[in-house]
Amino acid sequence: MEITKAEFVVSNSDVKKCPPPDRHEYAFIGRSNVGKSSLINMLTNRKDLAKTAAKPGKTQLINHFLMNEEWYMVDLPGYGYARTSKSSRGQFEKMIRDYILKRENLVCLFVLIDSRHEPLRIDLEFMEWLGENGVPFVMIFTKADKLTATQRVSCIDNYHRVMLDTWETTPLAFITSSEKRLGREEVLDYIDELNHTVKI
Ligand code: GTP
Ligand code: MG
């Protein structure tokens, strides 16, 4: 699939104010700074559609983008970023949790994981929470340009090994680099397949 048109629709802090849930929707989540907004720009061939930054905590709202006038991509704030106050962190996490649990047209959540690290507890616990709540998700390993080919393979293997302690099967995983435009076709083809097979 190619994306021929990508438009920003709306940003907001409340799932109830999101656009009507009448189209397929795919959202990108993961720790702050993992590369969610950069991945959306890479997938859409746009430099600055989603705002990125070198410092964590850039994306603060639920951002809807309409693709090919047909389906939505959603850029979410990251989790795990130590904000100035505990209450603002709590509010952020509530916004993300509400969106994930209540957004009825969310077909698949892409959980982004920094391929440079060993499996992190915060990511494993987040995915366990998704599993407990029956949220469909796949993993996307980011920043693969920082790894050798061998390291890329062992990064996925490490995750699978750790996850099989608690999961019967492991989720599908893509390996990407927004810098090198790696994994683009694979992710877009997966979305295209879901657009054609999942009913909203
Ligand atoms: P928040 O909105 O703060 O949660 O962050 P985010 O997950 O949206 O990350 P963002 O896309 O803003 O990128 C964070 C930093 O990582 C930026 O400095 C990007 O340039 C860098 N980055 C993102 N993707 C890649 C990649 O594939 N390779 C490399 N080397 N750097 C990347
Ligand atoms: Mg962002």
Image (cartoon, helix red, strand yellow):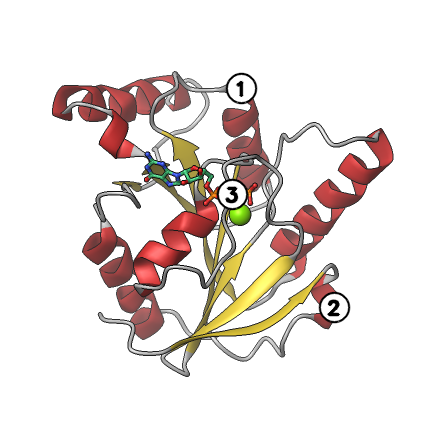
Q: Residues within 10 Å of mark 2 (few under 14, many from 20)?
A: few
Q: What element carries label 2?
A: helix
Q: Are marks 1 and 3 in contact (CB under 8 Å)?
A: no
Q: Where is residue 45 in the image (x, y as percent from the top left)?
A: 30, 63
Could you tell me which residue is drawn at 46 percent across and 36 percent down?
34
Disc 3: which residue = 53
* Image vertical order of residue 177 relative to residue 154, above or below: below
Q: What residue type is labelled 3?
A: Ala
Question: Which-is-in-front pick, marks 2 and 3?
Answer: 3
Residue at mark 2 to residue at mark 3: CA–CA distance: 28 Å
Which of these two is toward me, 56 or 112?
56
Q: Residues within 10 Å of mark 1 (few under 14, many from 20)?
A: few
Q: Is mark 1 on a helix, strand or loop?
A: helix
**In the image, the residue with mark 3 has its CB under 8 Å from the nearest atom of ligand 1:** yes
Q: Is mark 3 on a helix, strand or loop?
A: loop
Disc 2: which residue = 16
Could you tell me which residue is drawn at 20 percent across and 57 percent down?
185
- First in sequence, mark 2 or 1: give its number: 2
Disc 1: which residue = 121
How many numbered marks does the figure carry? Answer: 3
Q: What residue type is labelled 1?
A: Arg
